Image: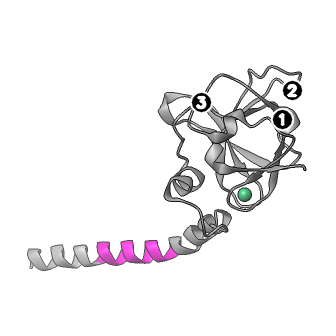
Amino acid sequence: MKKLNKTRRLFFKLFGITIFSYLLIPYKFLYSATKKIINKNLTEEQKKILFNEGTERPFTSSLLNEKREGYYHCANCDAKLFSSKTKFDSGTGWPSFTEALPGAFKTKIDYSFGMKRTEYHCSKCGAHHGHVFEDGPSETGKRFCNNGLCLIFKPSN
Ligand SMILES: [Zn+2]
């Protein structure tokens, strides 16, 4: 009799978990809908940064030495994010900007690695791009530290 109760309890427990996970499906769906792979040609490395908040190794981006005039676009959805006019050499090893184009990003506080940092995501596709710090060299005081792999540079001419 006791054993039967135990089995029954286990059954209800599993049943409960199943119901619960079904209830969570719409939320999971909503969450993934805000982050969507639009560019089908993204590499595994790019996906890791854009969708799993990864970070590329410093001093690896070909955009570090990019000095031409133009705009930096989201590698996933092609949204225009930065003007070359706001790019500067921060010495950190990641492409850095003093300002983003209006409405380009949404920010979120990130507590990983025991630090409080402000993470930013593309407003259009939700992909992660980098972190913004308050020690920028211009009057904005901002330093957008962006993964080069998340950006596509399009020169003006
Ligand atoms: Zn995007």
Say few, some or many: other residues with alpha carbon within 10 Å of mark 1 (under 14 / 14 to 19 / 20 or more): many
Element assignment for label 3: loop
Up/down of 25 relative to 149, above or below: below
Near mark 3 (Cα within 10 A), the count class, few <14, some 14-19 or many ≥20, is few
Element under label 2? loop
Identify residue for label 1: 99
Query: Depth-wise, is mark 1 or mark 3 nearer the camera?
Result: 1
Tell which tag, 2 or 3, sits nearer the viewer. Answer: 2
Residue at image coords 89%, 46%: 102
What residue is rendered at 74% in x and 20% in y? 135
The residue nearer to you, when weighing 78 against 125, is 78
Mark 2 near mark 3, Cβ–Cβ under 8 Å? Answer: no
In depth, the one of 148 and 35 nearer the eye is: 148
Tell me: 1 left or right of 134: left
Question: Residue tagged by mark 3?
Answer: 116
Q: Which residues are magenta?
A: 12-23
32 and 102: which is toward the camera: 102
CB under 8 Å between discs 1 and 3: no
Identify the main secondary structure in magenta. Answer: helix
Q: Residues within 10 Å of mark 2 (few under 14, many from 20)?
A: few
Q: Amino acid at mark 2?
A: Thr
- Ligand 1: which quarter? bottom right
